[in-house]
Image (spheres, coloured by chain):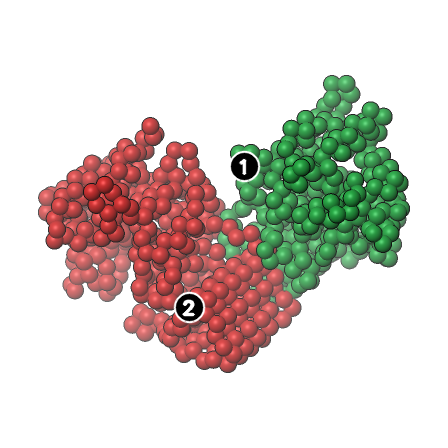
Chain colours: A green, B red
Amino acid sequence: MNNKMMSVLFASGNESKLNELTIHRTTASLPFGGRYRLIDFTLSNLVNSGVTRIGIITRSNYSSLMDHIRMGRDWDLNRKNSGIAVFPPFVLNTSRDVYKGKIEAIYTITDFINKSPEDYVIVANCNIAANIDFNDVLEKHIESGADITMLCHNGQLTSSRRVVITTNAKNRVTDIFFVESPSQNERLLSLNAYILKKDKLVAYVENAYARGHVDFEKDVVFAEASLGAVNVYEVPGYASIIDDVKMYYTESMKLLNFDTREQLFGADKKIYTKVKDSIPTKYGKGSYVKNSLIADGCTIDGTVENSILFRNVRIKAGAVVRDSIIMEDGEIMEDSTLAYAITDKSVTIKENRQISGFSTYPIVIVKNKVV
Amino acid sequence: MLTKKECVAMLLAGGQGTRLGALTQRVAKPAVPFGGKYRIIDFTLSNTINSGIDTIGVLTQYQPFELNQYIGNGQPWDLDRLNGGAFVLPPYQKAKSGEWYKGTANAIFQNIDFVDRYKAEYVLILSGDHIYRMDYSKMLNYHKTKNADCTIAVLDVPLETASRFGIMNTLNDNAIYEFEEKPKHPKSTKASMGIYIFTWEKLRKYLLSDEADKSSHNDFGKNIIPAMLSAKEKLYAYEFEGYWKDVGTISSLWEANMDMLDNSSGLNMSDKDWKIYARNTAEPPQFVGSEAVISNSIVTEGCNVNGVVTNSIIFTGVDIDEGAIVSDSIVMPNAKISAGAVIKHAIVGWGSKIGKNACVGETQTAAINGEWKIAVVGPDVSVDDKTVIKAGVMVE
């Protein structure tokens, strides 16, 4: 026993609900928070917790992810031993098809898992925005004596499929089920991230694969929960799954709140990302900026309110951007007005355009488009 | 066996920079923060790699820890190479001797082995305290075309300021026939930028004879160049056009930072083909609050701006509280400006805290005799609430 952890991450998942934002990329490489990609949060959490052996299973559109991660140097993961291993979609000789679900996907990398010297494994999706101390998770997991510990947070239900959990006083899962209808009430929701012993995972997966099961949540976690073997770890502070456009917008806007930023970018547990060597942001003489999160490399001569600007965005004089998210290399030209909009990378809004969505239905402008 | 390198760069980063006072008490001048997210040395390191020179020795001596740590394996500048890369070269104990770097030439003399190991034909001598963007490969081509023994980069300066520089007097073909250090009556306006390319074989010879001369200051400007001139070696001036600034004084450091705000200054940082690289700090994006007013300023990642910022350079991780006013100033990394504090024509050192309603510096309309009276709060200083620090005063 060495009480060390490795990790298996899934780069894809729920791309359909993020529609326009994931045409060109995996959920993992979705830009978030001004200078990050979603996967940065999970990778940084792992590295900050001393986890350095990380396998990333991809499914489709993974070139943006490869370009982002490269050798993993920006997360200090370019190690001689351990580091990042990216698994392109693996086609089993027997099925002649890309893997169907997590069970099949993990089954294809059983060798990688078995060969790793760590005892524990963290299995997670790459769509979590949170600052998680996995050492604390492991400690609580061992204390609880459970076979699986699942990470949870309190959040609202949206139209995306969520796993709702009820627990007893000892944090043991007593009921677990899928919900796919929005609700205002806060519930204990799964972050679809688990910690368990490595040999347990391999046994679960081999067993489930042999029976033709595909869904890790339903066929492994739910089944184990019904046996009383699953514990819950509630992530302290801000945590969220980003898996549809509305969620993406509301969670992004929460970053304008000081406490959220403190919890997510916590002082010594930093979030790392690919270094781009942008110059600092330049505010012109006529700039008017309020309540906004702004990355480096921007040039602002117009008005920006309640918005998030990614790296190298240019806001020209007379342009007004409100309640919007402008991704990298965006350009809003003179006298245009944007409200409740999400513009993907390298979008140009020409002079005198008026574009507006609504707070509950932000308009998305696809990558590289010129309006 | 090491791969042969045509040209090896040697960066002199050992100077104390006494005129920067509190800012260089604990760090060498090249490690002083500049322009929001850079250190002074980033410009020279980035120029070197952008010019296609991938082997660089950084000669450190004064307060080297910060600089050593900053350069590390050279990765941020793409200088972590299998062959070559960045090397920090402090003075070291040798079999027969062991001493500090006595002068610029002695620093290179003590590292003759380093250059020899790469079988370099040419050596580029740089200093780590200038702000500029320059393609050294063009200068190297010039050196080769002229079949020179030494090429010195020069900048055309206004005649009235020429007496502050080392001046190269040249013939029509830019051959140098005389070098005058800070001449009272300058004959030319070609000021040395402290950038030299030597044919290594020649320089090696002069370094050895200079070291043998006990009366020598072991300095390039004072000894090596004059010795080469009197021996009628081929020395040429290479004319550089563009932005270049020595940031040796508080006033010039402040001016060079302010040049980043002025599009006509020539300090164009946005050229994607000539990026200036820096070690990254992994800070979240900057947050601009509802009460903030920012105009004509540069702000960097990790900042929380809730006050009023005009004509200023705000470095990484700075907090400016509501009601604070910062104008015409430089606020270095992780400094905190409390509510009601007023910062005018000042430099606030890294990690410093300015108390509530404190006043640092005074508004100035023009430089007097070329010098601005900039108030300086040194690094990691805590300025109490309501303290007043006058123009030109330095607090440590």
Residue at the spot 34% in from the left edge and 67% down from the top edge: B21
**Residue B378 shows which numbered tag?**
2
Q: Position of residue A190 (x, y in %)?
A: 80, 47
Q: Is residue A217 visible?
A: yes
Q: Position of residue B27 (x, y in %)?
A: 38, 59
Cα distance in 3D space between marks 2 and 1: 39 Å
Tell me the chain of label 1. Answer: A
Question: Which sits in the foreground, B333 or A168?
Answer: A168
Q: Are marks 2 and 1 on the same chain?
A: no
Q: Is residue B15 above or below residue A344?
A: below
For residue B12, side relative to residue B287 (left or right): left
- Find the residue positioned furthest to the front: A1
The quarter of the rendered structure image containing the N terminus of chain B is: top left
Question: Which sits in the foreground, B224 or B23?
Answer: B23
Tell me the chain of label 2. Answer: B
Q: Which secondary structure lies at badge 1?
A: loop
Q: Residues within 10 Å of mark 1 (few under 14, many from 20)?
A: few
Q: Amino acid at mark 2?
A: Gly
State which quadrant residue B267 falls in: bottom left
Residue at the spot 19% in from the left edge and 51% down from the top edge: B218
Q: Which secondary structure lies at badge 2?
A: loop
Q: Amino acid at mark 1?
A: Arg
Q: Position of residue B345 (x, y in %)?
A: 43, 72
Q: Looking at the image, is mark 2 or mark 1 nearer the viewer?
A: 1
Q: Which residue does the numbered mark 1 point to in the structure image?
A: A79
The quarter of the rendered structure image containing the C terminus of chain B is: bottom left
Q: Is residue B176 visible?
A: no
For residue A126, side relative to residue A172 (left or right): left
For residue B206, side relative to residue A94 (left or right): left
